[in-house]
Image: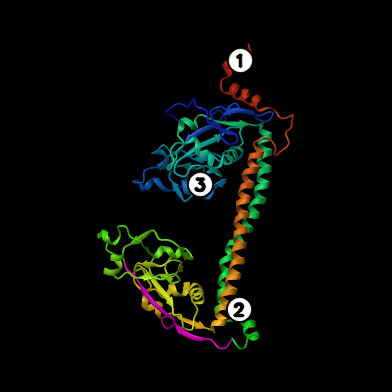
Amino acid sequence: MIGGRAATVSVLPGRCIISVGNPKSVLPSGWTWALLSDLADLGTGHTPSRKHPKYWGGNIPWIGVRDAGRHHGGTINETMQHVTQLGLANSSARLLPKETVCLSRTASVGYVVVMGKPMATSQDFVTWSCGKYLEPHFLMKALLAEGEDIRRFGEGSTHTTIYFPEVKAFHIGLPPVIEQRRIVAKTNRLSRKSKSARDHLNQVSLLVDKYKQAILLAAFRGSLTEGWRAANAGYGGSWSERTLAEIAAIGTGSTPKRGKQRYYSDGHIPWVTSGVVNSSVVLSAEEHITDAAIRETNCKVFPAGTIVMAMYGEGQTRGRVAVLGIAAATNQALAAIRVKANGPAIPSFVLWHLRSGYLALREKAAGGVQPNLNLGIIKAWRLRLPSKEEQGEIVGRIEVAFAWIERLSSEANSGRKLIDYLDQAILAKAFRGELVPQDPNDEPASVLLERIRAEQFPAATEIRAR
């Protein structure tokens, strides 16, 4: 049992059947409110000192918050870190039995897992090793049913923590043991079905990028409009190869010196950096600069319609492109590409071509620790160009296909959200006593509580009986 401060006397009802204090609300027939620590051995964990290597790398699984996040709502059989018996002996951590229920109470509040074998945990958890009158998986599902609302039992908005006075006052709406088992079995069957549906919908998301890449590959190889060329012989013809510098003016901007207020104070000219390529169209800027910055530095204002490409950037940023929906200046991390009005290419075709060549362009980055693109590499990028009429046809077909794919992806995302809602609705129905039939022959939970009290305090029970 956890020491320290006593249980709170406050009452804070939960969403379903977990509550701080006894809310005394109406429960299904045969159910009763019970103090959770009367039904399970309440505990927590600890982190052995990192200064002692002998405490770590043993054969005792040790649950951290990341482990709980990966296995949330299920049984955990393996952890990322292990401790030794010496680590347990020299810390407040202890080896907890199989089927102990763990709830993360700080950092990321609300992760719930059941131990698949004996394990230890960090101090970020509160644990319940259930007695014979409480099914561990029933307790886990009851905690899951609270969802995000379980954070209301804690304190702090940014970094919420559920403190032990509240934990010690946790009550649960307790059904008969046999009904607990029926609820667990039924919710498990339904969860398997929803997981199967979710897995199928996840496949849609995985296929979206593949479909898009296949369309772009067909578009710029010429096969997407092969039939169109046959039907429009007057507009088709052979494709020619050009460098990007031959069909567009390519430049960049700079960063006005930060210490000079006249470059920034009351500025009205949008100034963008490489982060804008995470959007398809740039419609606003987080920072603005002044006319003085344009006159006295290498900053330039590029017109709406300019294609911008990230030359630097961590992760997936480098090589991505977007279109300026507003006139804006850029920093030196962005290449500004303005397709020549009377040239052989149309801007939307060039934009899609650069999107299709994103991965190949990234590979051309030069440098040591952090490879980057530069204007020379970008200007030398080669494009195969059909006639302007065919370019327009290709762009139209890409946009129609991508719109269909995005709609499919959106519907898949909506389906996943609906499944999540359905899972919560199933749990809520279970804890209203509506999911499985109730058997009047089941021993009421109130009788179980009397038996628990008799087992804990046999002498007092005998005196009451006399």
Q: Residue at x 47, y 42 (%)?
A: 121
Q: Magenta segment: does it hold 244?
A: yes
Quarter of the figure that contains the C terminus:
top right
Spatial CA span between label 1 and label 2 = 87 Å
Q: Is residue 412 above or below residue 168?
A: below
Q: Indicate which disc, 1 or 3, sits on the residue closer to the N terminus.
A: 3
* Residue type, numbered disc 2: Leu
> How many numbered marks are there?
3
Q: Nearer the viewer, mark 2 or mark 3?
A: 2
- Taking the image as shown, residue 18 lies to the left or right of residue 275, namely right
Residue to which mark 1 is pinned: 462
* Residue type, numbered disc 3: Ala
Residue 359: x and y in percent read: 47, 72
Query: Can residue 96 be seen here?
Result: no
SS class, disc 2: helix
Give the extent of the magenta segment: 236-254
Q: Indicate which disc, 1 or 2, sits on the residue closer to the N terminus.
A: 2
**Viewer-proximal residue, 131 or 53?**
131
SS class, disc 3: helix
Q: Residue at x 63, y 13 (%)?
A: 465
Q: Magenta segment: does it hold 414?
A: no
Mark sitting on residue 245 = none
Mark sitting on residue 68 = 3
Q: Nearer the viewer, mark 1 or mark 2?
A: 2
Q: Is residue 410 above or below residue 254?
A: above
SS class, disc 1: helix
Mark sitting on residue 224 = 2
